[in-house]
Image: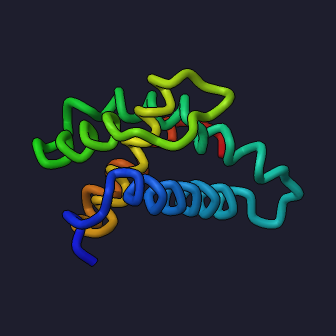
Amino acid sequence: MEIEELSPLALAFLGDAIHTTFVREKILNNCKNKLENYHVKAKKFCNAKSQADTLDKIFDSLTENEKDIVRRARNSKPKHIAKNFDEKTYKKATAFEALIAYLYLINSERLSFVLNSSIEEGENL
């Protein structure tokens, strides 16, 4: 798969799945053999506001290539906007998801940094 051939929205599509899987795995690992509402726990991290906040938090530590991916995705024209969030938040979340897919395809160490940054320290999963 050639990264350059993928649109920012295609990257966001993949990044959404990767981020959701990461969060769900962390929740399951921390709630073994407990009757929990996993979806409620996951949606605390897998929503546009949380993803946009994470992007804001890590933006200054991104490389220029990573910032370029973020800018391209943020400036893309999605076919729909999430009904629960404003357009700016939704575009930042899309950029965050595109960054995750980009890193998934090229740099697992940086991917780990971004994914772990999306779960707040001390947060009860």
Please state which of residues 119 and 11 is positioned toward the viewer in this rendering: 11
Closer-to-camera residue (11/56): 11
Q: In terms of depth relative to the viewer, which is nearer, 94 or 56?
A: 94
Please tell me which residue is depicted at 64% across the width and 63% down the height of the picture.
Answer: 29
Residue positioned 55% across, 29% down in the render:
49
Residue 42, given in percent of the width and then of the height, sits at 67, 48
**Quadrant of res 20:** bottom right
Q: Taking 1 as reference, is 52 left or right?
A: right
- Estimate the x, y position of residue 15 in percent, counting from the top left: 44, 57
**Residue 5 location (% of width, % of height):** 24, 66
Q: Name the residue at 77% across, 53% down.
A: 38
Left or right, 99 with reference to 120: left
The furthest residue to the bottom = 1
Image position of 118 (left or right of 33):
left
Residue at left 66%, top 55%? 27
Establish if 105 lies above or below 56.
Answer: below
